[in-house]
């Protein structure tokens, strides 16, 4: 059985303190950049508008998907529909077989992680190269991404040096430039010899059938234009209604993700290579993937999570994510959006642990460019877990006792006195619900008097 969140988080904190350092450094940097970039525009107005566009889209998703299919087909793309990961793999298998594909170059795509494209193709004997530098690093390390935008942010320079020395033969003390050059050498050869390029899509414009890809390294542009066949894996929620919507969405995505005004490379792909064009793929295949999204859409409390544009801002703002990084969540999506999406896409039972990887500080809701009500949704998953009887018995007992105490003033007063007499809660074995919390905190120093006593003393005579 796979390790649950609690155990994985505990292990990460005990065994990999360097992960906390690397993730904290990177996310605080992303945070500061986002704050500055939001400050340059009327971010509140933009966020409100973007949220409304996405809500409108989700309310008519069937119509916009039909429109997108017809525009994509008119532009020469071939459209496929996959209900789940196995369907998407099957479509890929057919394409690989039909085109005799031996080598694939890939742009970063979280959906391809959901579909497990790499493992699946490699099992079929196809060589797969991740071409985003962060993705390439974790591919060499045999790890999944730990962040939506920065897949390798959990790794420090020394770790990457050691990895490249072992796998690519670079010097043990190679500079970052030497490491990048070593990766470039391998990937350049892969771009020139690959038979197929696989990408995700940041957006697909329904009105025009345009596949939109945003990146900073140029690797996606090469992956989608150099090989004979380009396959774009697209979640069904990734549509935008109109081309005019891009103006704000492209900026919001970049500002929220990295603090840039716009991504360094924005590719607007309108069908495969035309007869009079010198380059580009001979075939463009767009695979629309559901994989649980329809059930999230049908869930009145959760559907807004499908507005997500995968900027990673909620991960960067999350104090819980910052402690362990993304691997502890054990899922494709981590951080606040992972807590909300994963049980909906995969299995509601996963909320029983993931739902508690949250301090309810609400920082995620404050930064989300499409204003997804993440804290409200996380609370809803917790409520559902309790309703399904998945909450731990000790916690249930503790909260029943707590409710009984705080709704009876005399018990409440007595409880406060007892706690103060006990001089702190840390490590209190008789209060198991606080065990995990207490093990990471210093001793509590109770005030000699309760707020209530101070209040009565100060105001008693008035
Ligand atoms: S939920 Fe919002 S902040 Fe988090 S990744 Fe998605 S769009 Fe970005």
Image (cartoon, rainbow, N blue to C red):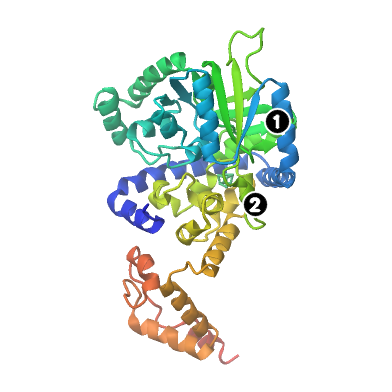
- The residues bearing labels 2 and 1 have C-alpha atoms spaced at a distance of 22 Å
Q: Earlier in the sequence, mark 2 or mark 1?
A: 1
User: Residue 110 location, x and y as percent?
Assistant: 51, 38
| Label 2 secondary element | helix
Q: Which residue is mark 1?
A: 69
Q: Nearer the viewer, residue 162 or 30?
A: 162
User: Can residue 127 be seen from the camera position used here?
Assistant: yes
Q: Residue at x 56, y 52 (%)?
A: 344
User: Residue 224 location, x and y as percent?
Assistant: 55, 21
* Left or right: 381 as drawn, with respect to 207: left
For residue 251, above or below residue 363: above
Q: How many marks?
A: 2
- Outermost residue toward the left in this view: 172
Q: Residue at x 63, y 38 (%)?
A: 238
User: Residue 319 location, x and y as percent?
Assistant: 46, 54
| Label 1 secondary element | helix
Name the quarter where the C terminus is drawn.
bottom right
Q: Which residue is mark 2?
A: 303
For residue 425, above or below residue 311: below
Q: Residue at x 52, y 80 (%)?
A: 403
Q: Nearer the viewer, mark 2 or mark 1?
A: 1
Toward which corner of the image does residue 243 lie, by quadrant?
top right
For residue 155, above or below residue 285: below
User: Can residue 218 be seen from the camera position used here?
Assistant: no
Q: Residues within 10 Å of mark 2 (few under 14, many from 20)?
A: many
Q: Residues within 10 Å of mark 1 (few under 14, many from 20)?
A: many
């Amino acid at each position: 059985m796979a390790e649950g969140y609690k155990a994985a988080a505990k292990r990460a904190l005990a065994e990999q303190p360097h992960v906390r350092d690397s993730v904290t450094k990177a996310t605080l940097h992303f945070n500061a950049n986002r704050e500055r970039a939001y400050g340059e525009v009327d971010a509140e107005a933009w966020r409100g508008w973007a949220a409304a566009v996405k809500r409108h889209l989700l309310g008519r998703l069937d119509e916009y998907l039909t429109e997108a299919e017809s525009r994509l087909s008119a532009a020469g793309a071939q459209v496929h529909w996959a209900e789940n990961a196995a369907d998407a793999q099957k479509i890929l298998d057919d394409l690989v077989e039909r085109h005799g594909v031996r080598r694939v170059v890939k742009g970063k795509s979280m959906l391809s992680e959901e579909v497990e494209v790499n493992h699946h193709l490699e099992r079929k004997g196809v060589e797969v190269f991740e071409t985003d530098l962060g993705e390439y690093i974790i591919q060499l390390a045999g790890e999944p991404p730990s962040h939506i935008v920065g897949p390798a942010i959990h790794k420090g320079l020394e770790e990457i040096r050691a990895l490249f020395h072992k796998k690519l033969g670079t010097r043990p003390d190679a500079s970052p430039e030497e490491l990048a050059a070593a990766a470039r050498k391998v990937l350049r050869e892969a771009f020139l010899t690959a038979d197929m390029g696989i990408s995700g899509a940041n957006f697909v414009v329904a009105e025009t059938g345009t596949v939109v890809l945003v990146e900073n390294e140029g690797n996606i542009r090469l992956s989608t234009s150099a090989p004979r066949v380009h396959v774009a894996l697209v979640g069904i929620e990734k549509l935008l209604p109109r081309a005019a919507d891009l103006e704000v969405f492209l900026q919001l995505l970049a500002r929220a993700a990295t603090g840039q005004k716009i991504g360094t490379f924005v590719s607007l792909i309108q069908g495969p290579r035309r007869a009079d064009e010198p380059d580009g793929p001979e075939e463009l295949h767009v695979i629309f993937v559901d994989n649980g999204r329809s059930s999230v859409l049908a869930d009145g409390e959760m559907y807004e999570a499908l507005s997500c544009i995968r900027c990673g801002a909620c991960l960067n703002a999350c104090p819980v994510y910052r402690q362990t990084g993304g691997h502890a969540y054990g899922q494709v999506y981590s951080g606040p959006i992972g807590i909300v999406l994963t049980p909906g896409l995969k299995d509601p039972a996963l909320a029983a642990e993931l739902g508690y990887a949250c301090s309810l500080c609400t920082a995620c809701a404050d930064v989300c460019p499409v204003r997804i009500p993440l804290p409200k949704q996380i609370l809803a998953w917790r409520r559902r877990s309790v309703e399904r009887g998945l909450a731990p018995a000790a916690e249930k007992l503790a909260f029943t006792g707590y409710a009984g105490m705080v709704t009876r003033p005399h018990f409440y007063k007595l409880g406060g006195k007892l706690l103060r007499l006990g001089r702190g809660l840390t490590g209190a074995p008789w209060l198991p619900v606080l065990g995990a919390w207490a093990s990471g905190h210093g001793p509590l120093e109770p005030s000699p008097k309760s707020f209530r006593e101070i209040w009565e003393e100060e105001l008693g005579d008035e």
